[in-house]
């Protein structure tokens, strides 16, 4: 599976515990409070504050419009809850990350940011974090990747017939790549007709706001999307046809640059897709192994989305931030 900590320092963000020394009582300190309970573990307001700060830096560096404070905190906490469930699964499975694997991963992070490890350490400190904190973030990312590998990727196989079928269907578009962004309005598992209709109406309202010029796609994604890329403005990056979710196959090739799709139904909810750019084409003679890899990643992504909903539904989650209407503590 692709590592999820591939691009920027800020993308490494996992919840970090903040400790307050009991001896530092010279000034009155506001009490920390629980903003969510995940099974038998708590996420504290201080954890959420630090993560929100990291996400803000990331969004600003990418020029993504900032949601209001309540929406941003809701989005960040939702991601932290999912991560906490995955880390608990890793603990139950006795998974671990060796020092050598962690050191290799840190060198890889530095290289992907076009830095030496020493330069990377300096940048971390300039952004107000310690190298030890970043190492812990990466360690947790690696644990989550192991959980996803064991639970999802290890169950996925691509047959020769699937490769043949893709090449036959893609034809001259086999090597076309699309730069996409995505908004998901989720529905619960086994939704009632009322829940499904409410999600569809919300997706249509968001599409209308975007197409009428009242809102930008990235800003709506960051504020409203239930997808894992929400805080990246919904950006899915460059993907070939084989790397796209199969439900987009008939829609994306017909989109014009900047156009937003009608709501697309999937078991997870309703999707809005916009085409940011397009490149390639005309070369269907791709190597079979490359097609196999891209088809594999597409299937993993589809299965991972459903799996994430399942583990969220099976866990005990008490989101206390929503009880406070999303306001800051």
Image (spheres, rainbow, N blue to C red):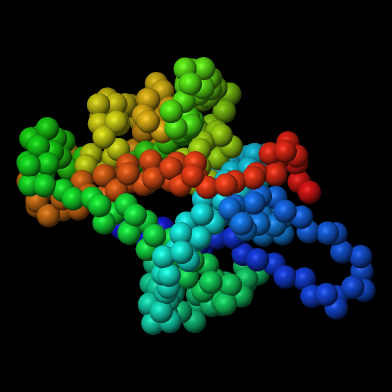
Q: Which of 20 and 10 is in front in this view?
A: 20
Residue 113 seen in this snapshot:
no
62 lies above or below 266: below
Q: Where is residue 292 in the image (x, y as percent from the top left)?
A: 15, 50
Q: Where is residue 183 in the image (x, y as percent from the top left)?
A: 46, 34
Q: Quadrant of residue 43?
A: bottom right
Q: Which of 67 and 78 is in front in this view?
A: 78
For the N terminus, the quadrant is bottom left
Q: Nearer the viewer, residue 191 or 106?
A: 191
Residue 205 seen in this snapshot:
yes
Q: In which quarter of the image is residue 116?
A: bottom left
Q: Position of residue 34 (x, y in %)?
A: 72, 53
Residue at (62, 71) in percent of width and height: 129
149 lies above or below 263: below
Residue at (50, 78) in percent of width and height: 119
Q: Which of 277 and 218 is in front in this view?
A: 218
Q: Position of residue 255 (x, y in %)?
A: 31, 26
Residue at (41, 79) in percent of width and height: 98
């Amino acid at each position: 599976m692709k590592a999820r900590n591939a691009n920027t320092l800020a993308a490494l963000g996992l919840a970090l515990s903040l400790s307050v020394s009991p001896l530092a009582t010279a000034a009155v300190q506001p009490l920390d409070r629980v903003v969510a309970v995940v099974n038998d573990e708590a996420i504290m307001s201080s954890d959420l504050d630090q993560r929100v700060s990291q996400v803000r830096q990331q969004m600003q560096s990418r020029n993504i419009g900032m949601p209001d404070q309540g929406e941003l905190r809701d989005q960040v906490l939702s991601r932290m809850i999912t991560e906490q469930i995955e880390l608990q699964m890793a603990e139950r499975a006795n998974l671990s990350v060796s020092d050598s694997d962690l050191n290799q991963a840190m060198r890889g992070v530095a290289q992907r940011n076009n830095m030496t490890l020493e330069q990377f350490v300096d940048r971390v400190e300039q952004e107000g974090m310690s190298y030890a904190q970043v190492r812990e973030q990466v360690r947790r990312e690696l644990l989550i990747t192991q959980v996803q590998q064991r639970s999802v990727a290890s169950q996925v196989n691509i047959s020769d017939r699937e490769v043949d079928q893709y090449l036959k269907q893609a034809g001259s578009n086999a090597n076309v790549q699309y730069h996409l962004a995505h908004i998901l309005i989720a529905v619960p598992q086994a939704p009632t007709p009322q829940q499904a209709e409410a999600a569809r109406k919300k997706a249509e309202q968001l599409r209308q706001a975007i197409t009428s010029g009242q809102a930008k796609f990235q800003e709506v994604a960051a504020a409203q999307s239930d997808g894992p890329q929400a805080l990246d403005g919904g950006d899915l990056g460059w993907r070939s046809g084989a790397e796209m979710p199969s439900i987009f196959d008939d829609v994306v090739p017909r989109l014009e640059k900047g156009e937003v799709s009608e709501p697309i139904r999937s078991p997870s909810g309703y999707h809005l897709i916009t085409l940011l750019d397009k490149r390639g084409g005309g070369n269907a003679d791709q190597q079979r192994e490359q097609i196999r890899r891209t088809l594999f990643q597409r299937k993993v992504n589809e299965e991972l989305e459903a799996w994430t909903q399942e583990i969220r539904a099976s866990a005990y989650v008490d989101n206390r931030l929503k009880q406070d209407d999303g306001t800051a503590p």
